[in-house]
Image (cartoon, rainbow, N blue to C red):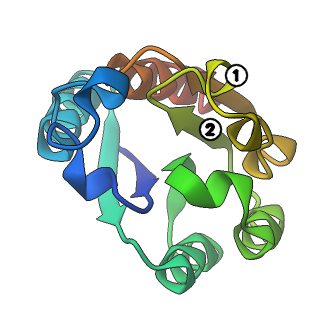
Amino acid sequence: MKKVLVINGPNLNLLGKREVEIYGKTSLKEIESNLIKFGKNNTLEFIFKQSNEESKIIDWIQDCMQDDYSGLLINAGAYTHTSIGIFDALKAIKIPIIEIHLSNIHKREEFRKKSYISEVANGVIFGFGSYSYILAAKAMKNLLK
């Protein structure tokens, strides 16, 4: 089994409750459960982290340098558009990175169209609601062949 770290940023703990017209009704726990099911059938073990704190997210990214993670799926939420610290941490790791967003960030406010993470990610998947995570898992499986 290859270990893949899944990092979710600010407010993603409120999925299913917050702005459901944008982010959908699926909770973060349901997304994690769907990824676990996918992983069992595809030799991937997902490790889940969520925080509203930028420093914790940076620490978890840096952990990828020492721990035996094979890949990283990241939905940094609002930090996607603002965090040079997360960008710098992602540049330092040498594993595949896939950026995820539930909504189509290019159909949203102007400030959401800029992603610092996209510049260092192997790929970006957005706009498919909670299914974005399964699509990202499929892409990661392909990258780790």
Three-letter amino acid code at the position of disc 1: His
Query: Is residue 27 toward the left or the right of residue 12 in the image?
Result: left
Occupied quadrant, residue 49: bottom left
Query: Is residue 80 toward the left or the right of residue 141 in the image?
Result: right
- Mark 1 crowdedness (10 Å alpha carbons): few <14, some 14-19, many ≥20: few
Secondary structure at badge 1 equals helix
Is 99 located above or below residue 135 in the figure? Answer: below
Q: Position of residue 52 (x, y in %)?
A: 40, 72
Residue in the picture at 70% in, 22% down = 106
Quadrant where the C terminus sits is top right
Q: Nearer the viewer, residue 49 or 53?
A: 53
Which of pointers 1 and 2 indicates the residue nearer the eye?
1
Q: Position of residue 129 (x, y in %)?
A: 37, 20
Secondary structure at badge 2 equals strand
- Mark 2 crowdedness (10 Å alpha carbons): few <14, some 14-19, many ≥20: many
Disc 2 target residue:
98
Three-letter amino acid code at the position of disc 2: Ile
The residue sitting at the front extreme is: 109
Query: Is residue 18 toward the left or the right of residue 3 in the image?
Result: left
Disc 1 target residue:
106
Choose the circle earlier in sequence order: 1 or 2: 2
Does residue 76 appear in the picture of this structure?
no
Q: Position of residue 99 (x, y in %)?
A: 61, 39
Occupied quadrant, residue 9: bottom left
Does residue 75 appear in the picture of this structure?
yes
Residue in the picture at 74% in, 44% down = 111
